[in-house]
Image (cartoon, rainbow, N blue to C red):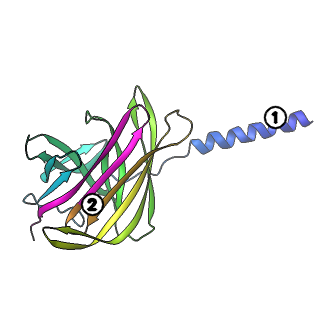
Amino acid sequence: MKYLVSLFSLSALLSVLFFGSCKKKKIIDPTNEGISTYLPTNVNNWWKYLASDGTVFKRYYTGRDTVVDGFNYNLFEQVDVNTGTIVKEFYAKFEGNYYTLLQLDNSGTRYVKAIVLNENPQVGNTWESTGSFTYGIAIPTKIEGKVTSINGTFTVNNVVVDSVVEVKSVLYGKLNLLTWTNCGTIIMKFRRGLGIISENYDFNVGGFFSKQYSNYITDYYVQP
């Protein structure tokens, strides 16, 4: 009898694990609702940054959109002011949340869709985005975001910019395909009507990819 009960209990446990793991993910509407509240999308705009590796680049909105995995993104470009090297960036707003494609390698071919900001940020707001990247096999990822400040300041051209929003995101990966590993953090700062103030990346995705890099705005033009 104990044997039968044990078998029943084991069967029930396996059923819970199986069906729990097979829950359908919420389908996100791929319609881009427009990002201009926090990332102004006039093609005459530009933002200039100094990076931790000494690179100086300008960020531009291209005026073009692109579809990635069925989702429509506004296409931005980072242009190195010395070499002309271009790095593509993808931003969009889906269901009230601002998304980007987080680059997970140096080739620019592996990205993870991640929420970087919500519609009306308040300190303590949290969210989670899940995805995967492929290195021979698909490796699950999870990014937990949190608004840590909404009243920060930053000085640009001797002018103090207030109401700066700071978001901290923690990147996790199932590097062994079983358990989540903390792979590091991304901290981004935004200003409503201005754009991205700064970025700080500090993560190591096992033996796949490592990124320690930051930048901050030094000048900008946003068309009124």
Residue type marked 1: Leu
- Residue 128 appears in which quarter of the rendering? bottom left
Residue 88 is situated, as x and y percent measured from the top left of the image, at 19, 44
User: What residue is pinned by disc 1?
Assistant: 7
> Which quadrant: the C terminus?
bottom left
Residue 99 is situated, as x and y percent measured from the top left of the image, at 32, 54
- Residue 166 appears in which quarter of the rendering? bottom left
Q: Earlier in the sequence, mark 1 or mark 2?
A: 1
User: What residue is pinned by disc 2?
Assistant: 33
The answer to if 220 sits in the magenta stretch is yes
Q: Which residues are magenta?
A: 197-224
Which residue is painted at 25% across and 49% down in the image? 72
* Above or below 91: residue 83: above
Q: Is residue 95 visible?
A: no
Residue type marked 2: Glu
Residue 92 is situated, as x and y percent measured from the top left of the image, at 27, 55
Q: Kindly report the distance in space between the C-alpha atoms of the residues bearing marks 1 and 2.
A: 52 Å
Q: Is residue 212 left or right of residue 218?
A: right
> Which quadrant: the N terminus?
top right
